[in-house]
Image (cartoon, helix red, strand yellow):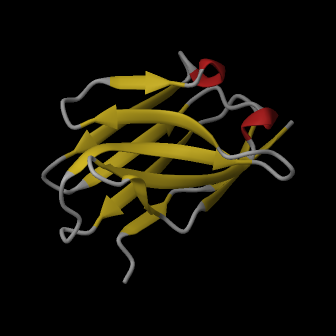
């Protein structure tokens, strides 16, 4: 069962933009927040951005002012708008959903974002 389906990854030049989408299955319940993580080769997975059920957002310092997380509750979809991309943004980006009871429990398959210089 695929519960989070990501799209929008790809190759972009530095300074460019990319928009990631993550569609959540309606079978996912009790979601407290949605977020985007990323993992570059040889590095730990890090939280990039998150949005709570109440609509509040938070971002990693490295992406503040450049990335925007948003959601469409009607479509059960969360987005990550990435602007002014830098080579250091290159990573596999994972959509995740946080259960109030289980924490970050649901994960997408990951989508590759590559930023060339």
Q: Is residue 75 left or right of residue 12?
A: left
Give the residue at x 43% y 43%.
35
Q: Is residue 10 left or right of residue 95?
A: right
Residue 103 lies, with reference to residue 17, above or below; the image says: below
Instruction: Please state the horizontal and vertical placement of residue 20, each as a whole percent of the image.
Output: 48, 50
Foreground pick, 54 / 72? 54
Foreground pick, 79 / 116? 79
Instruction: Please state the horizontal and vertical placement of residue 97, each as a whole percent of the image.
Output: 37, 52
Quadrant of the drawing holding the N terminus:
bottom left
Q: Is residue 48 left or right of residue 41?
A: left
Instruction: Please state the horizontal and vertical placement of residue 47, each as a whole percent of the image.
Output: 56, 37
How many labels, in total? 0
Instruction: Please state the horizontal and vertical placement of residue 31, each as a whole percent of the image.
Output: 24, 51
Quadrant of the drawing holding the C terminus:
top right
Residue 40 in view here: yes
Give the residue at x 48% y 33%.
49
Residue 59 lies, with reference to residue 98, above or below; the image says: above
Residue 11 in view here: no
Say which quarter of the image contains residue 15.
Answer: top right
Give the residue at x 34% y 48%.
78
Foreground pick, 87 / 5? 5
The residue at the far front in this view is 101
Foreground pick, 97 / 75? 97
Give the residue at x 27% y 41%.
71
Residue 83 lies, with reference to residue 41, above or below; the image says: above
The residue at the far bottom in this view is 1
Q: Is residue 54 left or right of residue 56?
A: left
């Amino acid at each position: 069962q695929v519960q989070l389906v990501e799209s929008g990854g790809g190759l972009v030049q530095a300074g460019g933009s990319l928009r990631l989408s993550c569609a959540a299955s309606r079978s996912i319940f009790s979601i407290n927040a949605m977020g985007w993580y990323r993992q570059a080769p040889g590095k730990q997975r890090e939280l990039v951005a998150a949005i709570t059920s109440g609509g509040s957002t938070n971002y990693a310092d490295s992406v503040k002012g450049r990335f925007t997380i948003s959601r469409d509750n009607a479509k059960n979809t969360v987005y990550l708008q990435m602007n002014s991309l830098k080579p250091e943004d290159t990573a596999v980006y994972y959509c995740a959903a946080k259960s109030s009871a289980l924490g970050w429990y649901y994960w997408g398959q990951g989508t590759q974002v590559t930023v060339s210089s």
